[in-house]
Image (tube, coloured by chain):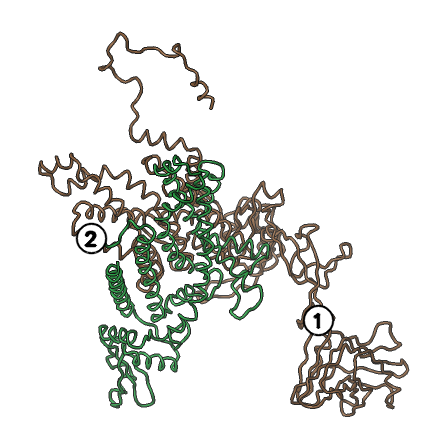
Amino acid sequence: MADKEKFDNLGPENFEFVQRDEKIYDKRFETKPIGYFKDAMIRFRKNRTNVVATMILLFLILMGIFVPIVTTKNYEELEIQLQNLPPRVPILENLGFMDGTQHLTEQTADINAYDPELGLYYPQGYNPDLIVEGSLENNEIFCTDNNETCVGGQVVVGLSKDHSSLTFSRDGIITFDETQNPQITVEIFEIISDDPNAVLNVNILYNFGSSTATLGEITEAGTYTYDLFEIIDEPSPLYGQISFELLASQQSNTSVSFTNVQVTDDSAESPLVDDTGLAIRAYKLGVANTGTIKRSQGIMVQTSFDYKIYEEVFGDKHVPVFSANDFDQIMIDNADVCTLPEDMDNIIGWEFEEGCPIVRVNGRTEPTEGPDGNFYFSYDLVLDYAIYRGYEEIPYFFFGTNGGGKDFFALVWLGLRTSLFIGLIVALINISIGIVYGAIEGYYGGTVDLLMERFGEIVGRIPFLVWLGLFVIWLGPGLLTLVVLLTVTGWLGVASTTRTQFYRYKGREYVLASRTMGAKDSRLIFRHILPNGIGTIITASVLMIPGVIFAESTISYLGFGIGHGQAFKLFGLFELSGVSIGVLLADGRTALVQRPYLTAFPALIISILMITFNMFGNALRDAFNPSLRGSE
Amino acid sequence: MLRYIAIRTVWIFIVLVSFLSILFITIRLVPEYPPTEEDAKAIYYARQVNDGYMTSYVEDDPAVVASIIDNTYERCSGCAYLQNGDIFRVYVPVPIIQQYTAWLTNIVTEWDWGVSTRISVNTPVYDIFKSRLPVTIRINFLSLLVFMPVGFILGIIAALKKNKLTDNVISLGVMIFISVPNFVVMLFMVMIFGYSLGWLPTQFPAPDVTGMVRYTSLVLPVLGLSFGAIAGLTRLTRAELTEVLTSDFLLLARTKGLTRKQAVIRHALRNSMVPLVPSIIFAFVTLLSGSVIIERIYSIPGMGRVYLDALTPQNFDYNLILALSAFYTFISLFAVLLVDMSYGIVDPRIRMGARK
């Protein structure tokens, strides 16, 4: 803007004649001439957005090349101990974002680990010290599980449709002492039956099960208390077993929901028997087994909390079986920090100094003789896991780790490198085929052109999916399929661009001149026509690379491309890993909910790559062929 | 024109039949993986005989049977020997050309595309195709209904406000959605709208569900398919309209006294339609292929998903692959014919097939 205003009001004083007195036609230019490439470069630089995009693209490519080389973290071996760690980034972690804590929900609470201060239960199987303060929450859910964590609720006893009675009894003999005034309380939540005469008998079995006495008959919900010795006339003490009998007509739907069965007496404050949900569930069905016992509406405490998983994984770890060979190797590798006791018999209970991968030795097995005559034994010890894995302190996995405990940050860049490599190689193949094909079409024209065009048209008209099917059946999934699939239709675009360029230049005078001087077809094609059209062809081809990466990730995502654990030597020069962005995305799909970062990071990187690559390609094309600007 | 259409149609069938022939023969040359259980094996080979791909005879010469059992008998390649008590039933593949004629005869005379061998054993392939087609077509047509108006309107806005903020924003969006693979967009949408916000179902419900889920479950796949297509159409509309807006006849229209609105609607838009109609037809074909990956992500029981399932390595369902390949190829070739014809309809100046 400022420049424009400066030139708005120009008077004669702003101008001067430069060549009044001298002739300048044999003088050298004072400034450098602007050539074709420099001109293109100037045009390229003019568009700021594209320059920024190019910078980002360059950054991504450099990261892809160097991160897998310089990283100190493991991305090749399986390391199950480190699997599924969440992302942890140095500065962001202070903002409570990507701080390496894992948000865990629906974890079963440990009934025995109640914190009275917080009024909350701690989860089972997690170290309470590593739970982020203030993040612990409890919630109750209904459960029907048959275990200790599911408390309360009712037990539903159902009678089979084709039976008219069901007996079930409590395991264990109870001593009833008349002097203590024993009472049996049965709480029934509801009785559901089509049969109005359905009845639940409360029985007591005694004399080792040979005698039965009915305490009462229950037909509707409520709490029933029976004074045992009031009802039956038997000598005290009575060794009895509580038993129930459900009676209803056949073909009726009958079930009883129990809330509680209690036996109380005066000898103690707490009841002798207190059977709620789970305990009633354990009642034995009679031999004939004519019904079912189910839990319903039990209550289970679940916890949700943020867990410092890094400290858990990299803290001290108890390893019960640690091979002696590995132990010796550690001693050799860390000779400066790990000092062994003078007498190796004192090794049990030995504590190593700070900085040694091994914290403490708990025990050692007796040596046993192996088949080769050597003696083998193992240690039971505590490892400092961070030092053991070669980290000075707890490491930062920027993008977390995947299911195999590999550093996902390095994997993403490795995948990017593979994708770029494949993109580049396939683009080169496509350009080579396309140029030769297009050159022949364009140069010879006529029938040759017509036939070759029709052939290209047929190849291009076959849908991608059908090509995919054909090559997967022929070659099986793998790198070869991938490359063939990407080339089978990929060269068409280059061929048509080349053909157009050839039609444009083949009639020019300089070609004619060369031909009259006896130049062969190959010379005309490669020395005269092709160099003139190559700029357009190449710039159009740069845009092919993102297209190839796009297709590669799609095919690999579907599982028909490359996969983990594969490694390829291309022309004996480059080694390609079997990890590409598409492969990583396919892996992440199974854990989209629990570990969204395994999908988000590769998806983000490939999105940025594609966007910047396309912008770069467009910018390049605009710079070289300003006439095409804005189209497409 | 009719003559032209007839020639093109014949041409389509020639290409289709020759490609399918190549596909059939190459697929038949790949080793098959018959079922491993004895019962299923017997049914499988009986099918092969029925379809005309194999012949069978009973080997009851005790000497030969004994030699087959102790593996001294020289088995022919590709043959199957099923033991049944003291006799062997031997299945011998017929020459590939005869298999091909049998296959083609079945299709032409009885419209019999064979039965599925893996996906849904012994169900006719055509029935599977019929049951899978509606959901795919529904999603594709909905995408078409979404992307066409949106793409047009965005393109027109961008062209009319060229190089202003609106245009820049739209162009940026176009750049993003053209670049990012549609399955990545789909994954992000499932993560955000499905799991994080919980607004929409995270996968396609079973066909018998009722209520709102039937409709809400269509939102994500339709959007996932549409974004790329919207971006493409917007870019094309913008480019075409920009070119027409700067042309001389539009200037003439303005000088005649038409308002800008009239000029744009009556002159510019119509003229920019010419390349757009074919692009929409091609976009539909692209959508059909693109829906494969969306169907895989969103567990939609459509054609693309069954095609990928049929392509499970070591577990190929050849008949299904052949039938679906035929469908996809036909659609693709037919689209070309439609495009050619549409040129003539959209722009009467273009007369396809006219002699010079």
Q: Residue furthest front?
A: B257
Lateral position of residue A36 relative to residue B151, left or right: left
Q: Quadrant of residue A24?
A: top left
Q: B315 or B223, which is in the foreground? A: B223
- Between marks 1 and 2, how big is the CA–CA gap? 83 Å
Task: Look at mark 1 in the image and give the residue it sits on.
Answer: A297
Q: Residue furthest bottom?
A: A210
Q: Quadrant of residue A33?
A: top left
Is B281 drawn above or below residue B129 in the view shown?
Answer: above
Q: In this structure image, what is the colour of chain A? A: brown
Lateral position of residue B336 relative to residue B165, left or right: left
Q: In this structure image, what is the colour of chain B? A: green
Task: Look at mark 2 in the image and give the residue it sits on.
Answer: B355
Q: B264 or A129, which is in the foreground? A: B264
Q: Residue furthest top?
A: A21
Is A36 drawn above or below residue B302 in the view shown?
Answer: above
Q: Position of residue A250 (x, y in %)?
A: 68, 90
**Amino acid at the residue labelled 1:** Gln
Q: Quadrant of the N terminus of chain B?
A: bottom left
Lateral position of residue A377 relative to residue A204, left or right: left
